Image: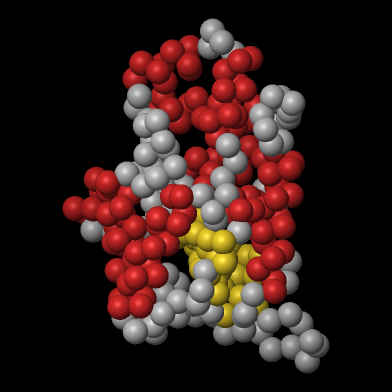
Amino acid sequence: MSTEAEFPEAQSPAAAPRSARLWLLRHAQASFGSADYDQLSERGVQQAQRLARWLASDVELTFQHVTCGTLRRHVQTLEPIVAAFAEAGRPLPQPVHDADWNEFQHEAVVRAWAAQHAHDPLLAAARAAHDRRAVHALLAAALHAWARGELDGEAPETWSAFDARVARARARLQDAPRGRILVISSGGPIARCAQHALDCDAERTVRLNLALRNSALSEFRAQGEDWELRSWNMLPHLSAAADRAWVTYY
């Protein structure tokens, strides 16, 4: 049930670092619009369970290492995956919880942008409509401003500091066992990994971030510090036409 054909590893007489296949999963839907965002919604619980069943259904799929952010929505997404693999008789390695895989504080970024644009129509539209397009437009404006450094000193973490944090998280995986690695994280860190692999600019990185769907799978191949993007934003566990209502972004 691989998302793509297997690629034979290149053989080199030099002592090159062994490669790893990294499956980066964005958490299932959190409680957007509620007082406590950092927990899965009812739909998010279902997404995580469907993802867990899809992963565990492949009898040949194993992971040599598991890393998970420390946010509640990360842990709640991982829990049914752990249970499904245990039930299938292929228990996962003990997860390593790493806060460097946590999301940036998106609400603080939006508040910092709103303080500078108190009369911008985007704010009124997002508050009144509560629909995905209005929220998307507001987030895009705030994240682009953050990436340009316009919110430095206002947001709790700068764009460059966030990049350095995710770089630390990637570097830590170099010490993990080689093979297939599972990482449960958020849209921001996964988009920064794509930026690293594709060498794209901040504007494209923000667009990649906002395009990521809840419980989506992205696959990378890593050899030392060199990362290659193999698949992006996949929902193999929600591929049927009847599953379209389960596809969410926020």
- Quadrant for the C terminus, please: top left
Going by the image, does 165 lie left or right of 55? right
The quadrant in which residue 154 appears is top right
Residue 156 in the image: above or below residue 125: below
Looking at the image, can residue 208 be seen? no
Going by the image, does 43 lie left or right of 142? left
- State the residue at coordinates (70%, 47%): 163
- Quadrant for the N terminus, please: bottom left
- State the residue at coordinates (69%, 36%): 157
Q: Position of residue 125 (x, y in %)?
A: 41, 16
Looking at the image, can residue 75 be seen? yes
- State the residue at coordinates (76%, 82%): 16
- State the residue at coordinates (27%, 54%): 46
The quadrant in which residue 117 appears is top right
Q: Position of residue 186 (x, y in %)?
A: 51, 50
Q: Nearer the viewer, residue 159 or 66?
A: 66
Q: Nearer the viewer, residue 178 or 211?
A: 178
Residue 109 in the image: above or below residue 200: above
Q: Position of residue 18 (x, y in %)?
A: 68, 81
